[in-house]
């Protein structure tokens, strides 16, 4: 084993570019915030939790598409503009 192969020598490449890893980490952070808000209860917290969870899932889906070099249809989860 070793290198970039997965457990059991499956041949899967588990390496990820630093910029993608940063986005995955941010997605995980947002999901954690969503969970914390949901546990606090209340209508406003629940609404914010849904928004954070949605953003987290959207970011993660975009990361996976970028990592796999999948071109998504125009207008589907547009990438944020760089400032």
Image: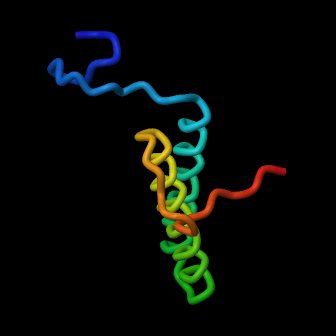
Looking at this view, is 51 or 68 the one in front? 68
Residue depicted at 47% across the width and 51% down the height:
71
Tell me if 68 is positioned left or right of 73 in this view. Answer: left
> How many dots with numbers?
0
Q: Position of residue 82 (x, y in %)?
A: 78, 50
Residue depicted at 61% across the width and 63% down the height:
78
Residue depicted at 58% across the width and 29% down the height:
18
Pick out the residue farthest to the bottom: 43
Pick out the residue farthest to the right: 83
Residue depicted at 52% across the width and 44% down the height:
24
Above or below, 59 relative to 48? above
Tell me which colouring the rendered structure shows.
rainbow
Q: Position of residue 73 (x, y in %)?
A: 49, 63
Looking at this view, is 7 or 41 the one in front? 7
Q: Quadrant of the N terminus?
A: top left
Tell me if 60 is positioned left or right of 11 in this view. Answer: right
Q: Position of residue 68 (x, y in %)?
A: 41, 40
Residue 21: quarter of image: top right
Q: Position of residue 55 (x, y in %)?
A: 56, 65
Residue 49: quarter of image: bottom right
């Amino acid at each position: 084993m070793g290198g970039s192969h997965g457990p059991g020598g499956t041949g899967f490449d588990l390496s990820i570019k630093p910029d993608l890893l940063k986005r995955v980490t941010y997605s995980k952070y947002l999901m954690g915030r969503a969970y914390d808000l949901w546990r606090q209860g209340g209508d406003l917290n629940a609404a914010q939790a849904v928004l954070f969870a949605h953003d987290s899932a959207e970011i993660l889906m975009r990361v996976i598409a970028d990592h796999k070099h999948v071109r998504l249809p125009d207008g589907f989860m547009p990438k944020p503009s760089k400032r």
